[in-house]
Amino acid sequence: MDILIALLGTFVPILYGLASASYALLFARDDAFARRASTPLLVASVAVHGLEILLRGAMKGMLPLGNVFESASAIAFSIGAVYLYVEARTKSPMTGIFVVPVVFLLEAVASAFVDRAAPAPAILRSTLFGLHASAAILGYCAFAVGAIYGLLYLALYHDLKSRRFSLVYDRLPPLEVLAQMNIRSLTVGFAFLSAAIVFGAVWVTTVTEASFLDPKVSFTLVSWAVFGFGILAHFLLGWRGPRVIYVSVAGFLLLVSSSVAINLVGSSFHVFH
Amino acid sequence: MSSTERGMTPLGAAPLALTCLGLSHKTSTLEVREALALSEEESAEAVRRLTAGSAIEALVLSTCNRTEFYTQGAAPDESRRLVREVVLGIKGFDLARLDGALYVRSEPDAVRHLFRVACGLDSMVLGEPEILGQVHHSADLASRAGGAGPVVGRMTELAFAAAKRARTETAIGAGAVSVASASVELARKVFGTLTGRRVLIVGAGEAAWRAAEHVRAAGAGEFVIANRGDERGRRLAEAVGGRAVPLATLARELAWADLVVTATSAPAPLVRPAEAREAIRRRGGRQIVFIDLAVPRDVDPLVNGVPNVFVHDLDALRSIVEANLERRRREVPRVEAIVEEGVARFLRWHRSLAVTPTLTQFRKRVEAIRVAEVERHRHRLGEADMAEVEALTRAIVNKILHTPTTRLREAPDELLGGTRVDALRHLFDLDGDRRNGGAARREAPGPDGPRD
């Protein structure tokens, strides 16, 4: 079992790498082979990755979210799966180049550093933690997808404004599709992050060394407020176009930079490795 | 004695005897093309006359940009004479008057030419799709007029396949290549689809009509026509199923529209940033696309600076058209490669026509030996054993024949002067069969004959 998981763990980044190269070729040259190969390669990557996560979870007898690398791997898997859904809905594989390499990088780093055999802290073997971590992962994934589509929106918006009809203009889906992807991801991500905060708040009362004053919690609450403001501005104040996009990208950058910084400094109870 | 000496055509050297004679927008003036344009009835009549003459099969392709005659079965000079006679008879036009305008393509070059035409490589607007429908129509016409046999049938079938591949695997047909279609492309790049979108057309001149028709064909839902002259505006509104309003209400209508097309001869801009800003405010921030087809411009260029407003003028539209044409031009080598694959496939198929009778005879000869040997031993075997022996010998024969059959079908034997078929005929004495009344005739298979 250990060997199989290790093998899959090595194989998954390679598959994502191949899928990334294929999507790059597709975007740059609209290559016929890449058009046929990109989606099947990504489907295979996500499927093998899902199997690897399942086996890892089965071996540990808990959700495989015990440390930052396992979480990164789970986020990579979720983004890959969400992207496949988006691709099927929009019927355009041209945005894959902006998503799949992110998945590849996340998984490559996670796979290189994760200690698959390390026993998980007993504290993490709780249902509440499972719910909290799963909701957080899905929220991060949705915000990441939203930020990527938000940046693509800005690139196309800029091309249309400046009348520069580059590859971006040629290949990207329409502006309104990108805007919808952004606001939907933002809304879904906000719902999951809210759930993660609620589960976390309940769970934290059962854990002695945790505190609401934790920097990770503080930064997450600030990000949550930023996202909430973006959603309210869109639905209640009628904000359209780049303004909402800027808010969603800013919220995501805050979320990611605070997570990375806190995990590097290691002063939060959210650091499990 | 070789097959050539016996008066048979060696394998693969069977002449295709295909000639294309024609003229196009690249070689002739519009007056000449008009004089030679054939109606549907005239095209069918031309096919009938060609095949009543020395051509075995014929295809006539006549569009506003080209008139071409494909004949099979006649040598190039004979084909030229025949086409001249037919055109003179139907159009009263002597092709001898058009020395420089006519082109003649023979054998594989004729096939290659049709494939290039079908893929849009020879079109006035590179990669335009209408030509494929026209080739389809000509093939149908030739079929109904009795001109399409196996060669023309297979050639057109593979031309369609090559054109389909070119359109799906390359960008030869991608992007808008006219100002009106570029306007639609731009609006789609913002809204995704124009279905149900509200369109405000400012002006009712020729450019406004053309743009309105394109936008309506793209699925736009509601139209408002704002024009200075009421009557022309009303006529355009009726044509596209919209309502006409006076130009004075333009500022109010802006907030209603998703797409605004302006094409008036007004000397100064009709839409300024303040109006655009107000329109965006009233529509809750939703985007507006302005397509300004007027010179001088109807929309102040500063309007493009208003958030969520996109202004595109003639220069922008032309740069899209030019970029799309350039993209199509870059795809030409890939399409040429598809054409070459198609031509090679056609030629392989044509070669296999020559080898088919020999292979049929070869199989019959070996099968006859098998049956005779099995029969010779029948009296020594029971019923059950016979069934086993039948199955066993059949399997052995099939396995032995498989490789030589495949090799002969796929090999470019004309390079070897047909020596392999000669060797096969000699080794298995297939011409002995023929002398004894066997079936070694060269038979032309139907259109459903061998496929490569």
Image: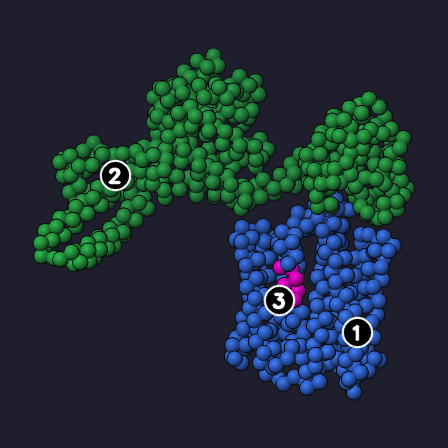
Q: Earlier in the sequence, mark 3 or mark 1?
A: 3
Colour convention: by chain
Query: Could you tell me which chain the residue with mark 1 belongs to?
Result: A
Q: Which one of the lettered chains is coloured blue?
A: A
Look at discs 3 and 1 and give the one toward the viewer.
1
Which subunit holds the residue at mark 3? A
Q: Are marks 2 and 3 in contact (CB under 8 Å)?
A: no
Q: Secondary structure at mark 2?
A: helix
In three-dimensional space, the C-alpha distance between marks 2 and 3, rounded to whole angstroms, equals 58 Å
Q: Which residue is mark 2?
A: B357
Chain identifier of the residue bearing label 2 in the image: B
Other-residue count near label 1 (Cα within 10 Å), few / some / many at <14 / 14–19 / ≥20: some
Task: Determine which residue is flagged by label 3.
Answer: A104
Q: Which chain is green?
A: B
- Looking at the image, residue B424 sits to the left or right of residue B148; the answer is left
Q: From the image, tell me which residue sits under label 1.
A: A198
Q: Looking at this view, is A201 or A222 the one in front? A: A201
Span shown in magenta? A77-84
* Labels 2 and 3 positioned on one and the same chain: no
Give the residue displayed 59% in from the left and 53% down from the top: A26
Q: CA distance from mark 3 to mark 1?
A: 31 Å
- Asked which quadrant contains residue A233, the reply is bottom right
Does A83 appear in magenta? yes
- SS class of the residue under badge 1? helix
- Could you tell me residue B134's position as x and y percent? 52, 30
Q: What residue is at 88 percent from the left and 36 percent from the top?
A: B251
Q: Looking at the picture, tell me which residue is in the foreground, A57 or A45.
A: A57
